[in-house]
Image (cartoon, helix red, strand yellow):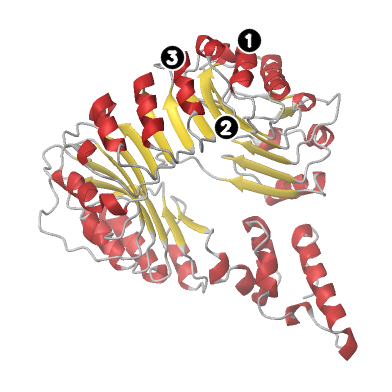
Amino acid sequence: MNHLPASFSTASVLLHLSHRRHTRAMASSDCQLHINSLPDGILQEVFRYLSLTDRKTAALVCSLWEQEAFSAGLLANVRLCMTSTCGEAFLEVLRNSWRPYRNVVVCDMRLCGTVLCEFVMALLDIFGTTIEEFIMKNACTAAQVKGFAERMPNLRKMVIFVRESEKLSVESLEFPVLRRLHEVGVWIKRDHGVKSCQLDMLRMAPNVQQLRMQYRFHDEKMFDLLERCANQLRSLHLFAYCYPFPIHTLRFENLLVLKLQGVPQLRNFHRLSHMLRGMRKLKAIHLDYRISTTTLAVVCNSCPKLETLDIRADGLEASSFDYLSDTPHLQVFMVQYLHIGLLEQAKPINGIKNLHIYVEHKAWRNEAFVDNLSKVFPNVCKMKYIHRQDTVYKDHIGSLIMHRICSKFTHLTKLTISAERCQNDFVLSIEPSGLGNVEELHCVQTSEFREPTMENSVKRLIIHNVDPTKLLFSNMTRSFPKLKYLEIRSCAATSSEFIAEIRRNFPQCIVHCEFMTKLKWKYK
């Protein structure tokens, strides 16, 4: 088959160019080549530049294109998601599929206990040897995790939710050794009366480098795991309560990323200072609690290679920002609870290029706040701001805030607008004329784009958590004349005809639509 469907314009252009170039190269031999006669690897290289939606469309052309569009090399970023809509019939379809899926997600399954375990086991019997990433968002036991791991010898990343009950067997479990398993995320919960979790993570992942753990109980196994793998960890995300062990005595000498949530004993300045003293390679630190000026000084002085800092700043003084200026590699600053009094006295921090700020809505409405913020961070080119409020402000106020930010931050090229709670009544009206030099715009709950009074520079537009049927395409096309990429993410499913309508309204754009159902549990 020589032609693609009319709606598949992106792939059509790319394939046409590849075919024409190869035809010219072979003109001297008077060969007329079919598009499927291109040298090995050319089709795969073309498909590599397409979105998953476009690749699905290309796979409908012929069996060869299906094989090339979903070959093993192109499945690295494709996830096979098993939800409540999947059943035995879906498993039968997968058994007849030759696609070597590498990433599997099990979430929102209404099955439970033994039935769920049998379903997952059947799935892993099909793709287990090719799976490199496995995410299980439904609760399972340590014994079930053992059975899953035995079927995935090439596993590289695992995220699981383990729940142990006193009704389960207490027999010892011998977990398989997965030496390629370098990234682990585990949320552990125990029922009352269970003394210890049977999950032997250290045996299963002896070479773990990225570790995320969340638990709320006392268990020596958890500290033993951290103690024995401390020196090999590159990333640690720890969310814990009631944890009396001296974690501050451990030495994470090769750690690059540290994220602490809970962990009450590390709110003590001296313990945190003792822990950070050996982290000379640390590049990113996220502290989900209020810190003082003294703590900030320890962080900046102990971590000379720090590039990303995420803190709550309600405990800081104006002089605190001097430590940020003295951190030579710091470029990303993520901060909560900044107040105007702190900004008025702070000196400019020229090194910060990326600013994530999470403050109350009333602060943004104060013109002096935005003015002082731009003076303290004069070279910011990427910004994400989050509103902290339950009620929704009026559209003209939202546009006014955006205009103030874009006019004050003259180097700003990427702007992300978010909200603490994305409620159905949160709808932000975008004023395209007030976007300054912004070339990439991300926003949530947006369905209205006002008529522009002057041209803007936006080339990439990404909209989250919207009802796509309420988007006014006519306004969007006039509002963003330079748009080259449009991405719409929504929790509301829609038809293929509607997606085709979006593409017709933006013929010069790469259009990507992603529709999904909301999950009850999300492990970040």
Residue 182's x, y, as percent?
36, 58
Q: Mark 1: which secondary structure? A: helix
User: The residue under label 2 is which amino acid type?
Assistant: Gly
Q: Secondary structure at mark 2?
A: loop
Q: Which mark is residue 368?
A: 1
Q: Quadrant of residue 466?
A: top right
Q: Is residue 60 visible?
A: no
Q: Earlier in the sequence, mark 1 or mark 3?
A: 3
Kindly identify which residue carries mark 3: 317
Classed neighbour count for the residue bearing mark 2: other residues with Cα under 10 Å, few (<14), some (14–19), many (≥20): many
Q: Is residue 57 above or below residue 382?
A: below
Q: Going 45% across and 51% down the picture, which residue do you hit? A: 83
Residue 321 as seen in the image, left or right of residue 501: left
If you read the primary sequence from the N terminus, does the residue marked by circle 2 or circle 3 appear first?
A: 3
Identify the mark nearer the N-term, 2 or 1: 2
Q: Helix, strand, or loop for circle 3?
A: loop
| Residue wearing tag 2 | 351
Residue 351: give x, y in percent of width and height.
57, 32
Q: Taking 515 as reference, is 431 above or below it?
A: above
* Residue drawn at (34%, 35%) of the image: 260
Give the tally of numbered discs: 3
**Which residue type carries mark 3?**
Glu
Q: Specify whether residue 234 is in view.
A: yes
Q: Nearer the viewer, mark 2 or mark 1?
A: 2
